[in-house]
Amino acid sequence: MKFLVILAVAMACAAADVSHIVRSDDYEVPIVKSGYELSPEGAFQYFYEAGNGIVAQADGVMKRVSSADEPALEVRGSFRYISPDGTPVETTYVAGEQGYVASGSHLPVPPPIPELILRGLAYTAAHQPATVEKVYKP
């Protein structure tokens, strides 16, 4: 029984895909351009461009959030690269009060809301039930 277990483990190791472990030239990408600036107030800018076509940039600024006294960081940026199938991919994003909001032609888009559901939502919004105040008598 032990022999079968050892044989199974040996066959699994022999059949394992270790191509991601083997070092190749694809992992050595030169940085063509890069830059970074940081202000004492917390704002920043960075950009870089790699030799394989990957480009990224971002700008961060400190903003006052209306609901809080503390400033919050808002980051706007973009990155682009060529996918393995040769399609150029570009994404722009804003990270701030609304969370992380990305846009790009490669991102999925939800289907339109059916007309019947839109009419139902409009009807529900127009016909809200009257609120009844509870009278509490001790």
Image (spheres, rainbow, N blue to C red):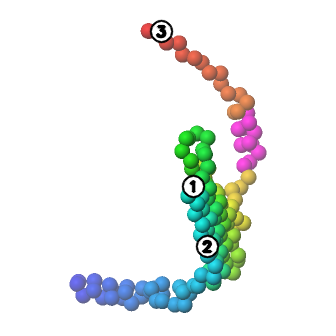
Residue type at numbered disc 2: Gly
Residue that mark 1 sits on: 41
Residue drawn 57% across the image and 85% down it: 29
Q: Is residue 94 above or below residue 123?
A: below
Residue 100 in view of the camera = no
Residue type, label 1: Glu
| Residue extent of the magenta highlight | 113-123
Q: Could one spot residue 48 in this view of the protein?
A: yes
Task: Give 40 or 13, whichever is nearer the viewer.
Answer: 40
Residue nearer the viewer, 86 or 130:
86
**Residue behind mark 2:** 35
The quarter holding residue 37 reads: bottom right
Give the Cα distance between marks 1 and 3: 55 Å
Name the secondary structure under disc 3: loop
Q: Do the residues labelled 1 and 3 touch (CB within 8 Å)?
A: no
Query: Sequence order check: which comes first, mark 2 or mark 3?
Result: 2
In terms of secondary structure, what is the magenta stretch mainly? helix
Residue at the location (48% across, 84% down)?
20
Q: Is residue 127 magenta?
A: no
For the residues labelled 1 and 2, the Cα–Cα distance comes to: 19 Å
Answer few, some or many: residues within 10 Å of disc 3's Cα (few below 14, many 20 plus, some between 14 and 19): few
Image position of 99 with respect to 33: above or below: above
Element class at badge 1: loop
Q: Position of residue 10 (x, y in %)?
A: 33, 88
Where is residue 58? Give x, y as percent: 63, 65
> In this rendering, would 7 be left or right of 104?
left
Query: Quick check: 15 above or below 122?
Result: below
User: Label 3 amino acid?
Assistant: Lys
| Residue to which mark 3 is pinned | 137
